[in-house]
Structures are given as structure tokens and as C-alpha cells.
Image (cartoon, rainbow, N blue to C red):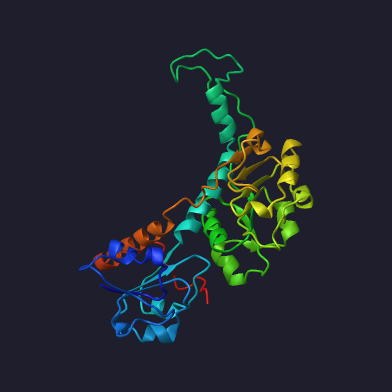
Amino acid sequence: MRVAFLDPLEDRLRDFPAQYLPAPDFDVRVTETPGKLPEGWETAEAIIWWNTPVDRAFLEALPNLRFLQRVGWFRARGDVRYALERGIPVAVTPFGVPDRVAQHALTLTLMLLRQMHTAIEALLEGINPDRLPEAEADSGAYTVNWARVPNIASLNDKTVGILGFGEIGAAFARLLPTFHCRTLAYRRRPLTPEQEAFYQVTWTPFDDLLRESDVVVSFVPSTPESRHMMGAREFGLMQPSAYFVNCGRGATVDEQALLRVLREQRIAGAGLDVFSVEPLPMTSPLRELRNAVITPHSAGGIGGWMDTFARIRANLDRVQAGLPVTIAMQPGDYQPG
């Protein structure tokens, strides 16, 4: 299969096509000029792109086209309606690192709501407030939640607010429909009605999002404008029962203000993967809080592009075998433009 990449690859990725799409099964070319096919590659059967927009005129010039792979939920651009009209499958593959960060944020969210940190601590400490005797499981003794972990909740039907709705925010939003969440999103430029419908979110002003959300999840990058955007005033707008999760950047949060509201239980808790100083000092008071779940800036992990290329390969194999691709776009889906 002849496969063309419309976007150049970074130096660290230049060996990936040969590794994941080896000859003779694949004949691969990567453009050196964004948006332009390698010379003589109008016969390409598969096109892979992320930044370079595609359109009807571009697709009409590809008579052998069998498959389009868009990389990215929010970042990718291009109108592929013509391909869909021709019955050519178009798949969406999330960027590996944003996808991993989104999953990490969901994990922190679920840990907080399910009181997982409290439950693990109770198990390790052998907490048994009712002094229940050890007996064979299912012997009739009532041992459900024997450690009596309080306030175990569910994400179902909660209002989740996403701060920083870019590629990671979009990947996170795609994880929520199974929980029937009401999902709010804030970014400086409002989302279009088409974007809101596709991602199943509602663009909401910043303060309103903080007031209405049961969980506020931040993916905001560090810029001079975003420094300490979550401070005493902002945490004061949140509900006492709400949780704050930060998988964006530590500089976007006034850490002292967050420590105060957590200590005084003016919000229910926080899940944090990023901090104002990293590695997190051993003397940091965040380490002592019972209502905080903290991880060592590990949300992105490593190998994000490995995930992406493995997904690309799997979809190309499906096309070759005449099988449906994963995460296929439908004719009525939002077109990134």
C-alpha cells in the first residue's frame, strides 16, 4: 500500500515509518513541504495528516485513494466530506501524549470521587472500625466497605468543567459520554455550535464553569496570561463538594491558595500531576493532605507517538483486509476546517 504523510516528521520520529510500516507491505513517503504530496505521489492509496488541511480539490486529485487517517481530535484541520461521499473511510486517531494525559486526568477524577486514596490507605493501615471478625467471604457477615470509607461517589451524571479546551481537553471530553456527564468547556475563544455538538460540551464563561462544576479539570498551558489563573478568588467560586484536577501546568495555580482551601476543606479535594516546583519537594505540605491525590508529572508518560503509529498501522491493516477502521468519521461529523 502506498502511504503518504502530508506533514513532515520531527527528527526523533524519522525512523517510525520504517519501523511501523515496513516494506514490502507498505511504500511510505513523508513530505518535506507541509501540505504538498511528495513528487509523483498522486497515486497514494492512504493519506495521513494532522496540521495540514485537506479539502475537496486535494482529494479529487487522488484517483487511487482508499483511506484517510486524521491524527488529532481538535488540532487537525481539513474538510473530508468529499471522501466520505465517495465511501472512502476516514479515521481519527488521537495524538498519543494528549490521549495519555486525558486518561490520567480521568483516573485522578475517578480516584477522588471513588475515594480510592482513602480506601487504599485504610486497607494498608488495617482500619476496621466495627471490629468485624475475619471470616470466609460470603459467609453471611456484612463486610461491604468494611473500612467504612466515607463519601464514595460516582462520576455518573456529574457536571464536569474543562479548562483549556485544546487537543487534550477534546480527548478528555471524548471519555465522558459513557458517564452521562454534563460537560462544560472554557477556552478564550468560544467553541462553535458544530464543535460543541461534536465534542458534546457547552462552552461556558470561566466563572460560571467554576460555580457549576462538580469536577474542574485543567489542561491550561503555562503562559504569562495563565499564571495563577486559579487563585483564592477562583477556588472560592467552586462548590464545597467539588474537586479540582490539574494535568496542565503548575504555574497556572496559586499553590498556596489551593493549600488553604484543601486544608480548610472549602473544596472536597484535588488531583494534581503538576506543581509549582518539580520534582515536588519532600517538605511540600501537599504530601501530607488526606484530600489530595498527587502523581509525579507522569500523565504524559513516554511513547505517545508509539501509540499513534501503532494505531495508524492497525487501521491500515484493516483497510487492507476490507474491515471497518476504528474511530471512523461519519458524514455528519464536525469538520475541523
Residue 261 position by quadrant: top right
- Foreground of the two, 245 or 222: 222
At 37% across and 86% down in the image, what residue appears?
60
Q: Is residue 146 visible?
A: no
Residue drawn at x 29%, y 61% is 19
Image quadrant in which you'd find residue 189: bottom right
Quadrant into which the N terminus falls: bottom left
In the rendered structure, the answer to whether residue 279 lies left or right of residue 208 reads left
The vertical placement of 110 against 202, above or below, is above
Q: Please provide percent x and percent y for residue 148.
A: 60, 25
Front residue (pair 42, 88): 42
For the question of whether residue 226 can be seen, the reply is: yes
Q: In this view of the protein, which residue sits in the foreground, 158 or 215?
A: 215
Count of labels in the image? 0
183 w.r.t. 120: above or below:
below
Query: Residue 133 vs residue 323: left or right?
Result: right
Could you tell me residue 149's position as x and y percent?
Answer: 60, 28
Residue nearest the viewer, comparing 318 with 97: 97
Q: Quadrant of residue 166?
A: bottom right
Image coords of residue 296 (percent x, y): 55, 44
Residue extending farthest left: 24
